[in-house]
Image (spheres, helix red, strand yellow):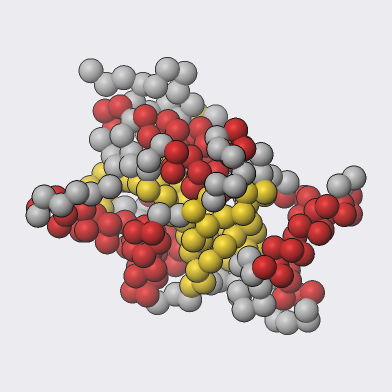
C-alpha cells in the first residue's frame, strides 16, 4: 500500500519510487525541465509544489518546485526524504557578486552562507551548509560535457530579496549593506535564496544535495562600469543537471554491481 506523508504538502506518496529529484523554485519551470526527461508526466499541483516525473537511463526522476525561500524548500526536502528520495539538486537562478561572474554562466555552489532563518531551527549556526562532494563533482563533469562556463565556490542564501536590492528602504539598511559587502570581500560568487536550506536539511536527513545556478545578471559588474546583460535562458543549466544525474546513476549502478557501499 502506498501511503502519503501525513499532511503532505508536496502531495506525493511513498510508492513514487524515485531516488533523484530536481528542485526549481518556480512552479512554471517544472514542465519545462521535465521536457528534458524521457516520458514526462505531471503528478500534482498543491500549494507551491508542482511536480512531474520522467526518466533518465531507466531511472525515475522527480521534478518538483520548492517555491521561494527556505521554509518551503525545507518542507519539500523533508517530505521527499520521507518518500525515498536520496539525491536532490536545486536548479535555480542567482545574481553574480564577483566581477568575473558573467550572466549566462553557471555557479556550482560548494557551500552557502546561512543568511536566512530557517536552518537555525535545524542546527546551530556554526554548522556549514555544504553541498555533497560527489554531486558537485558529477555536475562539474556534466558542465564540461555541455560546454558551459562554471564557477565553483560559496554563494549567499538570504531571506529578503528586497533587502538585497533595495536595502535603503529597510530599517536594517546598515546591517544589510555591511554583510553584503563582507560576503563580496570574502569571495562569495552569487546571491540566491534556497541553497542553504536545501543543503542543511539534506545533511541532517542524510540526503546528497547539490545545485546548479544560472546567473541572470551581475549588478556588481554594472556598478563597476563593466558590461552586463540579463540572461534568462536556462537551457544549459537544465542540460547540466540532467547530465549530472546520468553520471550519478551510472556511478551508483557500478557501485551496486561491485557490492560497494553507496551513500
Q: Quadrant of residue 136?
A: bottom left
Q: Quadrant of residue 5?
A: top left
Q: Position of residue 18 (x, y in %)?
A: 28, 39
Q: Position of residue 131 (x, y in %)?
A: 45, 54
Residue at 53%, 50% (x, y): give it: 129
Q: Is residue 39 visible?
A: no
Q: Position of residue 52 (x, y in %)?
A: 38, 40
Residue at 72%, 50% (x, y): give it: 161
Residue at 40%, 54% (x, y): give it: 132
Q: Position of residue 233 (x, y in %)?
A: 53, 64
Q: Is residue 76 visible?
A: yes
Residue at 36%, 65% (x, y): give it: 137
Closest to the observer, 230 or 113? 113
- The residue lying furthest to the left in this view is 258
Closest to the observer, 115 or 246? 115
Left or right for 173, reference 124: right
Q: Quadrant of the N terminus?
A: top left
Left or right for 55, reference 210: left
Closest to the observer, 259 or 79? 259
Closest to the observer, 123 or 133? 123
Amino acid at each position: 500500500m502506498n501511503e502519503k506523508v501525513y499532511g503532505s504538502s508536496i502531495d506525493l506518496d511513498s510508492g513514487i519510487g524515485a531516488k533523484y529529484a530536481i528542485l526549481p523554485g518556480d512552479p512554471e519551470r517544472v514542465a519545462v525541465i521535465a521536457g528534458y526527461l524521457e516520458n514526462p508526466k505531471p503528478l500534482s499541483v498543491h500549494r507551491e509544489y508542482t511536480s512531474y516525473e520522467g526518466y533518465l537511463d531507466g531511472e525515475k526522476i522527480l521534478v518538483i518546485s520548492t517555491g521561494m525561500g527556505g521554509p518551503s524548500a525545507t518542507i519539500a526536502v523533508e517530505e521527499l526524504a520521507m518518500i525515498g528520495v536520496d539525491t536532490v539538486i536545486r536548479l535555480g537562478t542567482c545574481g553574480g557578486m564577483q566581477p568575473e561572474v558573467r550572466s549566462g554562466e553557471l555557479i556550482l555552489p560548494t557551500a552557502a552562507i546561512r543568511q536566512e532563518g530557517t536552518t537555525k531551527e535545524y542546527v546551530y549556526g556554526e554548522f556549514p551548509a555544504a553541498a555533497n562532494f560527489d554531486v558537485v563533482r558529477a555536475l562539474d563533469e556534466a558542465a564540461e560535457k555541455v560546454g558551459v562556463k562554471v564557477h565553483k565556490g560559496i554563494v549567499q542564501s538570504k531571506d529578503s530579496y528586497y533587502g538585497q536590492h533595495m536595502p535603503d528602504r529597510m530599517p536594517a539598511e546598515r546591517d544589510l549593506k555591511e554583510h553584503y559587502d563582507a560576503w563580496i570581500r570574502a569571495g562569495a560568487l552569487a546571491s540566491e535564496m534556497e541553497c542553504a536550506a536545501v543543503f542543511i536539511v539534506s545533511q541532517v536527513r542524510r540526503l546528497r544535495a547539490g545545485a546548479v545556478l544560472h546567473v541572470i545578471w551581475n549588478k556588481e559588474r554594472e556598478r563597476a562600469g563593466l558590461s552586463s546583460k540579463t540572461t534568462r535562458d536556462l537551457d544549459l543549466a537544465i542540460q547540466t543537471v540532467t547530465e549530472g544525474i546520468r553520471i550519478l546513476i551510472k556511478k551508483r549502478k557500478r557501485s551496486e554491481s561491485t557490492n560497494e557501499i553507496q551513500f
